[in-house]
Image: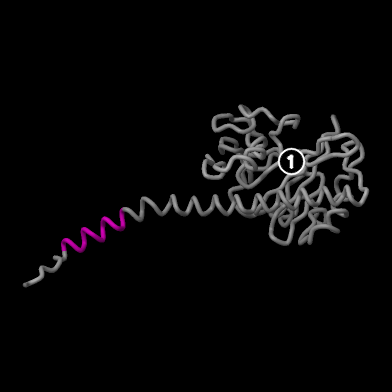
Amino acid sequence: MKLKGFTMAEVLITIGIIGLVAAMTMPTLINNAKNKELEAAFKKQYSLLSQAINHLQAQDVCTHTSCIPIGMTMLDYFSKIYKINKRCDNMAEGLPEYDKWCFPKNQNDSKYTNFNKTSSYLQTAAFDDGQFYTMDGALISFEKRVTDAKVFISVDINGRAKLPNALGHDLFMFEIVNKGPVGVLVPMGAEGTHLSDESVYCSKTSTNVMNGAACTIKAIYDPKYFTRLP
């Protein structure tokens, strides 16, 4: 029996179909891989931050918002816990190196955006009271507000120089909330945190510049969070 071979036209059509399917599916596969990478990095940094705060308490360092050390003092304490690659206090404001690695002091930072990427900047007043890089490339920042003594600790899980640089994607906020005589690390968006209104601060439609701040609680407890990023 004689077997019939494929014609050149049939081969080209088959290759074209395969190419079309690949073109349609590859972006989704790449996006899923990136989101998985963000999820793994977030979980790692959340665990390390929690351990760091617990370590401070074990060393009798104040974690209550009335007396928690912030800024350079906090960097000194954290340098005993983390392997610090770079401290941002060692770089003068305005230098290109500072702009590359660190949040500028109290500015509208055009290198960052909000959760649904409707903002052309991020206000850095919530991130600029002390910053350092870990050996694995995460940027940790501290803020203690003068008006109400609220304390924020934030982490850009892959650093300022690497995208997406968006709240709720690779930049996550936590708050120190007082529990009796001590302060504990609480994911922003949890009940009692400063930015907990999901309709404003973790929304696919809100244009608020801080939209994404309250997504930290979802990133921890929603198993599908990173697959649904806007």
Residue 67 picture location, percent across and down = 92, 40
Q: Is residue 203 above or below residue 222?
A: above
Q: Is residue 227 left or right of residue 123?
A: left
153 is higher (above) or lower (below) than 90 = above
Residue type, label 1: Phe
- Counting the numbered discs, the total is 1
Q: Nearer the viewer, residue 156 or 122?
A: 156
Q: Mark 1 — residue?
A: 174
Q: Which residues are magenta?
A: 9-20
- On the image, the x and y values in percent for residue 45 come to 70, 52
Residue 6 position by quadrant = bottom left
Q: Which quarter of the image is occupied by the N terminus?
A: bottom left
Q: Position of residue 21 (x, y in %)?
A: 32, 53
User: Which residue is drawn at the image coordinates 65% and 50% (left, top)?
Assistant: 42
For the point 52% across and 41% down, the residue is 228
Of helix, strand and loop, which one carries label 1? strand
Please report the residue visible at 69 percent of the width from the left and 58 percent of the height from the top: 137
Foreground residue, 93 or 212? 212
